[in-house]
Amino acid sequence: MTFQELGLNSDLLKAVTDLGFESPTPIQQQTITLLSAQKTDLVALAQTGTGKTAAFGLPMLNVIDCESKSVQALILAPTRELCVQITNDIKNYGKYLKGFGVTAIYGGARIDGQIKDIKRGVQVVAATPGRLIDMIERRAINLNTVKIVVLDEADEMLNMGFKDDLDIILKETPKEKNTWLFSATMPKEVERIARNYMSNPMELSTGKKNEGADNLEHIYYMVQSRDRYLALKRVADYYPEIFGIVFCRTKAETQEVADSLIKDGYSADALHGDLSQSQRDFVMKRFRSKTLQMLVATDVAARGIDVNDVTHVINYNLPEDVENYTHRTGRTARAGKSGIAIAIITPKDSGRIKDIERIIKKKFEKKSVPNGLEVCEKQLFNLVHKLHNVEVKDEEIESFLPAIYDELKDLSKEELIKRVISEEFNRFHEYYQNAPDLNIQKGAVDGAFGNHRTTRFFLNMGHLDGFNINSLKDFLADAAKVHQRMVFNVDVKNSFSFFETESKLVDNFMALNSADIEFNNRKVSLEVSNRKMKEGGEGRGGGGYKGGDRREGGGYRGGGDRREGGFRGGDKREGGFRSGGDKRDGGKRPRKSGSFGGGDKPSFNREKSFGGEKKKGFGKSKF
């Protein structure tokens, strides 16, 4: 079936043709056919990436009266990113409709400009619930003329706490309107909205409730918790052309993982709620242009991300709500393309994998984390593939060729190929030749508190000393002369911290007490911890805990506000966090070569597996 057969007017068909749409997706075919033939409420179940915006946008524009400047259609979306994306799409669909207007209403932008757009007159409004309620309370928008309300990603709006907001907004609209509800999953709260605010809705679905896409491969790797980040890097190296999203649970973890990836030479950045709108827009612009290879994001920040050709979704941690797994993985395998969803788990997560399998009706494949040899092989053949397909600019290189031929005249074709490959491959092989096996061995348990193979330490340093997880790991590893991966399960509190290491390294860390190491004029003190302490509990001689008055002496300037050097100055932070806007990692941005995303992929700049020496960039091919 073609769009011409769906009953759309000529102006919409012209716009669809301009956009390169050839044939409707299943959800588009069903909704456009139904909504063009009759006025009805609708509940449509469709996965992210199946063309939902056109599924409701085209039939909506097919019935809009462009001669009237009143608001006739309201689209509610959970996030500003999705709100803006929908607005842009609707604008493209209606570009040939004379007198048509659409505007976006969302937080993080000046409200006075949005009010002016409404007063100027538009037929369609796309909005986030919070900002729309603000507009209603200001009496800046009239919803009495609304004929169609679209709830896009209704399940996500409810997950984000917009239940009461939706109730308020829907009560402001006429009872005789049509409500179209689109959702990837169908929890009870979504069914409640359908029951309370819709009249005999038609139901459409392109799959069973909460099911995952058929063209998506689900994989999990099981590792010790301390090896989670190393496993992430191993996966990224095993898929040289990865263009993916890494999901973390918290904003802090998101920033820490992104900073670590940047530090290790990967083209990555963070997306989370602590960023300003301009910072979020900047990050998304880089990701959409494929300047970034990996976007590290929280669930909330990633709502509404609509980026084509995402190859991988990596669950650095499984989501708290297993239904959110469907939304995470909906970022890839879009529009009929295939994708890979990867979960990095520890043994205690095995039960949650089974829960997710039950919900998405798909089985995970357990795989071993690639070893060093396997990664090297993948990188080698990726390099060969690039050499084979590289664009040769004959005119630009022609004047240099005689000297090059003369320099290489004593080499055979086979020798030349081996040397070209080795120039790049040797660096990578040197990094991975002694790489550890990250897979859980049979009979092993995770290195959690109480495991006899690991030891937990108490340290009298914390956030008030300027430490975050990454900077504390660096400090301890350097002081004890061990690799950073030997410092794991780090828990940084305000005035103290906990960390774990392998029991065989206890002497290395206990030796720091006798070494009289100081940090910011305070003596570093460690103890083996037999129990987890809560912040604010009993002080342990010398004010090591928050319960004692730890700001006296010891470098705290008489209890004054000692938050300079990373804590004072608004959003300035140490250790790779944003400083004064968009400056990151103390200026340590990834080096670049011409191997990915139009010449903006960073060089391979990882540290050796068990040492601090950095290697020159893998992938800096002269070709």
Image (cartoon, grey):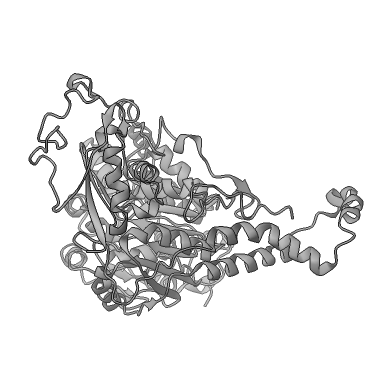
Whether residue 554 sits left or right of residue 479 in the image: it is left
Whether residue 535 sits left or right of residue 353 in the image: it is left
Whether residue 342 sits left or right of residue 293 in the image: it is left
Q: Residue furthest left?
A: 538
Q: Position of residue 379 (x, y in %)?
A: 60, 64
The quadrant in which residue 440 appears is bottom left
Vertical side of 545 occupied by 265: above or below: below
Q: Position of residue 605 (x, y in %)?
A: 55, 50
Q: 27 or 576: which is nearer to us?
A: 576
Visible residue check, residue 530: yes
Q: Position of residue 364 (x, y in %)?
A: 36, 77
**At x 31% / y 58%, what residue is drawn?**
504
Count of marks placed on residues: 0
- Which quadrant holds the C terminus? bottom right
**At x 50% / y 35%, what residue is drawn?**
587
Q: 549 or 273: which is nearer to us?
A: 549
